[in-house]
Amino acid sequence: MGIFAMPSLGADMEAGTLVEWLVKPGDEVHRGDVVAVVETQKGAIEIECFQDGKVQELQADLGATLPVGAPLALILGPGETAPEPKKPKAPAVAAKPEAAPNEVVADKPKAAPGPAVAATLPRSATAASPAARLRARELGIDLATVTGSGPAGAVLLTDLEAPKSAATRGQTAAPMAEMRRAIAAAMVRSKQTIPHFYLSETIDVQLAHEWVDARNADRLPSDRLLLGALFVRATALAAAKVASVNGRYVDGAFCPSDRVNAGIAVALRGGGLVAPALIDAGAMSVDETMAGMRDLVLRARAGRLRSSELTDGSITISSLGETGAEAMAGVIFPPQVALVGLGAPKLRPWVVNGAVVPRTVVTLTLSVDHRVSDGRQAARFIAEFQSRIASPETL
């Protein structure tokens, strides 16, 4: 028998709002099943179950904001039976004071019953994320009147926080304010508690760039690879070789991860950032990595990430994409111990076999937790990354 509790979905999370149950009492559940949706500063997150069993009781109401660790449901394991309900104690009866002579004692009026808690959130024919549905209900907005920016026109939380929605409400909106506060809290905590150090290297990625172009020549746009997929693969393979950068620092000790769960930093429309993990990225091919990255980006922007994707990351990759600054030194996502920052690819004069030629290069900056690792280990990781990206056919 286990209590399914409000999980911690990041170092910055203190509480979450239950917006949807995906199970009911009597349902069989298995480890990894999505059983509820919780709204946090990062959006609506699908919460997974971590045991096999049967849902005995739902212990939290929809719309309730609960702290991390608060009970949400009771789940019985295989062969377990429900506990006997405790007999309520008889309430103590307070002695009524005697009325004074000629005093009239009037009965107190009964309090009006409070509004019943809705069993389910109101549904709309309009496609929308759970977070958007909840926010629309709070603001009294008809989702049918909002133009969605998500997949297939789905309404996202950011669509409701846009200036046009603010005008409907007659007030000024602060887009993504809650998420920015959450990011600020996490990054301040990271910089205050993690002794960062940084190593940088500019790497020749010309062969990788040419290999990607050749692979994409006969592909549809939806199936094409990005150079970023090779960066994720090179990171996963390098992290598997240098264990000191792949894991978490918890309760004063480093816990290395037995697989590489590569966090992918995703910029959200309207502002904000999340870094869901590509689970077991080390076991994926380049094409599987690219498909996984596309899926994470779509679901992150639609507010449909899973709790394990936000909590199980073991190292994070943050890339500026095809355009932008040449280098980036990132802040580690606690409790992880390393972050790979990749600047935008640049065409630079480069020495190859004694001749100066134009080459596409990328500057990698590794942010590392000095409690766990040192410069030598960090340099080993960069060398492994460089070796892998120089032979893209082996990725």
Image (tube, rainbow, N blue to C red):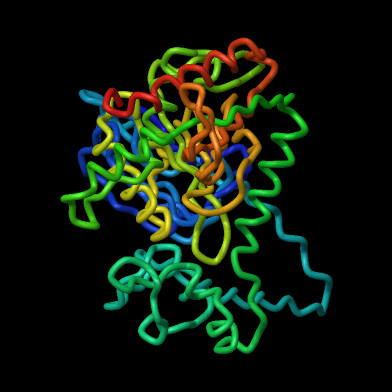
Q: Where is 81 relative to 70, above or below?
A: above
Residue at the spot 35% in from the left edge and 44% down from the top edge: 293
Q: Quadrant of the N terminus?
A: top left
Q: Position of residue 181 (x, y in %)?
A: 68, 54
Q: Position of residue 239 (x, y in %)?
A: 46, 20
Q: Position of residue 4 (x, y in %)?
A: 41, 37
Which residue extends farthest front? Answer: 355
Q: Nearer the viewer, residue 246 or 174?
A: 246
Q: Say which quarter of the image contains residue 21.
A: bottom left
Q: Nearer the viewer, residue 180 or 390?
A: 390
Q: Say which quarter of the image contains residue 301.
A: bottom left
Q: Quadrant of the C terminus?
A: top left
- Can residue 280 be seen by looking at this rendering? no
Q: Where is 241 relative to 117, above or below?
A: above
Count up the numbered dots: 0
Q: Where is 304 relative to 244, above or below?
A: below
Q: Position of residue 61 (x, y in %)?
A: 44, 56
Q: Nearer the viewer, residue 258 or 243?
A: 243
Which residue extends farthest left? Answer: 218
Q: Nearer the viewer, residue 120 or 242?
A: 242
Residue at the spot 42% in from the left edge and 82% down from the top edge: 146
Residue at the spot 26% in from the left edge and 25% down from the top edge: 80
* 208 on left or right of 373: left
- Can residue 15 be seen by looking at this rendering? yes
Which residue extends farthest top? Answer: 376
Q: Say which quarter of the image contains residue 237.
A: top left
Q: Where is 58 relative to 204, above or below?
A: below
* 224 on left or right of 377: left
